[in-house]
Image (cartoon, rainbow, N blue to C red):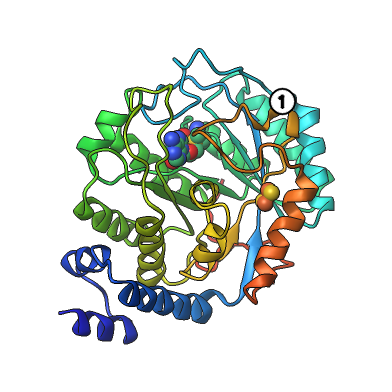
Amino acid sequence: MLNNIWEKIDSEEDLTKEELCCLLSLEDPEQLELLYQKADKIRKKYVGDEVHLRGLIEFSNYCRNNCHYCGIRRDNKKIKRYRMEIDEILNTAILASHMGYKTVVLQSGEDMYYTTDKLVELIKLIKNNADVAITLSIGERSYDDYVRFFEAGADRYLMRFETSNPELYAKLHPDSSFENRMNILKWLKQIGYQTGSGIMIGLPGQSIEDLAQDILKFKELDLDMIGVGPYICHQDTPLAGNPNGTVEMTLKVIALTRIVTKNTHIPATTALATLRPADGREKALQAGANVIMPNVSPVKYREFYELYPNKICIRENAKQCNSCIKRRIFSIGRTISKGYGHSLKKKMDNAIAL
Ligand code: SAM
Ligand code: FES
């Protein structure tokens, strides 16, 4: 069966769920190497050697939700909460653009302190003062909010569906439904955002079949960006004591995501680098990934955006992360994109008339 699957990958035929399960079950190092090589070849053909850098600003760790895996969940009273004010976020975005980043990612818990008007003002200020694309990653809001952010100049939106298994989704998310997440992803695309989603690998109760289904879901949703990172257990959550996801399974899913979705943007995630600081990002970039999101948040806040323990880059500043990441990219013979790194899929003019 495996020979047949390798041939299907080489001729770029669609893989079935069973075939994806077979590949996700591989353990032999030589076969895994072959899988990563095939993903790397498809990455090179469809998205080239350039790595896109997105400056990540974690602007608030307040969250109204209680996701069972997440360290900044509402009920975690042990964490010190912080919020950056609008000028501070703007100045951080300007700093990111001066460092050469052509995208800033604004990420936070679901924090309603930032009203729609405040966020609209922030998006306009960034667009008027820095030559960057803006990605939002701020969770669930109303349709009208998403339209207003888009009109103000936001280009992209990230909203992971975390798992495509609705029962597992329901167990992990007391405040939101799988159906609602899927609806929001549809809205975002319809409004005209370059839309990203993604999953965690190794969630308690997640099966190989679930992961195969997740990969098929990526294709069905026709996403522009797909983030795949390991679940890392946080001791101050209801999932305390569970094992972390593994580096190997994360790399397999990244490789298969590239093989199945071809021209999407796929980051080498911070969570993967946390489990394997020495070369996790390099491994991901050599197994299908083509994006890195260096942290540009002010150092004084970094330790508090603790989604999971031992997160990397807590003490480094934006400049140190910048040179660290460049060195890693060059060490594997890749180059850094000077462009915005927009979606390679959608025409930029197909947003609905607003
Ligand atoms: N609040 C926004 C949302 O829910 O989309 C954005 C911020 S949320 C903290 C960003 C992502 O962090 C989630 O989509 C989830 O996949 C990831 N995350 C949270 N807790 C994690 C953990 N314990 N291990 C790995 N990733 C985690
Ligand atoms: Fe922050 Fe390497 S990316 S120190």
Q: How many marks?
A: 1
Q: From the viewer's perspective, is 120 left or right of 9?
A: right
Instruction: Judge left or right: residue 291 versus residue 39.
Output: right
Determine the residue positioned at 57% across, 49% down.
156
Q: In the image, 75: left or right of 20? A: right
Q: Position of residue 60 (x, y in %)?
A: 62, 27
Relative to 275, is 305 above or below? above
Q: Quadrant of the C terminus?
A: top right
* Residue drawn where x is 20% and y is 36% of the image: 167
In front: 140, or 354? 140
Task: Label 1, secondary structure: give it.
Answer: loop
Nearest to the observer: residue 316 or residue 205: 316
* Residue 114, percent from left and from top: 63, 23
Q: Which residue is mark 1?
A: 84
**Relative to residue 286, is residue 12 depicted above or below?**
below
The quarter holding residue 25 reads: bottom left
* Label 1 environment density (alpha carbons within 10 Å; few <14, some 14–19, many ≥20): some
Quadrant housing the N terminus: bottom left
- Seen at 30% across and 54% down, the residue is 214
Indicate the position of residue 344 as horizontal and vertical percent values. 54, 68
Horizontal and vertical percent position of residue 12: 33, 82
Q: Amino acid at mark 1?
A: Met
Instruction: Report the front residue among 154 and 83.
Output: 83
Ligand 1 within 8 angstroms of badge 1 C-beta: no
Observer able to see residue 193: no
